[in-house]
Amino acid sequence: DTEVTQTPKHLVMGMTNKKSLKCEQHMGHRAMYWYKQKAKKPPELMFVYSYEKLSINESVPSRFSPECPNSSLLNLHLHALQPEDSALYLCASSQVSGNSPLHFGNGTRLTVT
Amino acid sequence: AQSVTQLDSHVSVSEGTPVLLRCNYSSSYSPSLFWYVQHPNKGLQLLLKYTSAATLVKGINGFEAEFKKSETSFHLTKPSAHMSDAAEYFCVVTPGGSQGNLIFGKGTKLSVKP
């Protein structure tokens, strides 16, 4: 089991739906991340929060909207997604130090129909 | 510019034989290097990390890696493969500094035959 918990594990949504992915960690990490992973590819960075403030947005379309309500929680709000957005969405956390390893959750498998 | 190259997209070994997964990196700075493992439909789990201390790094599940600056390599090894080692392995480099600035290799799929 990982120390980063993601819900739901699976999500199927239509292109007009609004849904949210949730991530929680209690390791005291102050950096949190969203990654997108397509099949047979490495994860791609989407967003980074540092001390609950958005520090990196890797030119992600606005249909993905991150939120960090507190130091333990990270959300990803989804709206008007496209079928090509179907992927495994991974949350991770780390200490803020630049060379600290990331701790990943098990991901949410998203299918957009 | 920083980059990481995993030299094999797929490695197949028999159970009980040694494992070698190769990784070469390029970095303008003193890098930190990691190996992660990903089992099917799971997240990434940290196997080991190198952060400029000992060049031979021991990780979980019997894996280890040796940082060789002269060869710019960080190969992952295990003396004896187990069926449960079958997974995707990612070599990752970070030059440090900017948070989240991880550079992933393309991954190596390890198959273990009984």
Image (spheres, grey):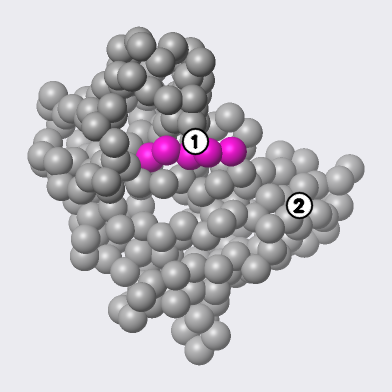
Q: Observer-nearest residue: A34 or B94?
A: A34
Q: Residues within 10 Å of mark 1 (few under 14, many from 20)?
A: many
Answer whether labels 1 and 2 touch (C-beta < 8 Å).
Answer: no
The residue to which callout 2 is attached is B81
Q: Observer-nearest residue: B6 or A18?
A: A18
Q: What amino acid is found at the position of numbered circle 1 in the picture? A: Gly
Image quarter of residue B54: bottom left
Q: Position of residue B74 (x, y in %)?
A: 54, 71
Disc with the residue nearer the chain's start (1 vs 2): 1
Q: What amino acid is found at the position of numbered circle 2 in the picture? A: Ala
Q: Classify residue B34 as left or right of residue A51.
A: right
User: Quadrant where the C terminus of chain B lies?
Assistant: top right
Magenta stretch, main secondary structure, is strand
Q: Classify residue B107 as left or right of residue A93.
A: right
Q: Is residue A27 above or below residue B81?
A: above
Residue at figure coordinates x 36%, y 57% from the top left: B102
- Chain ID of residue with mark 1: B
User: Quadrant where the N terminus of chain B lies?
Assistant: bottom left
Q: Which residues are magenta?
A: A35-39
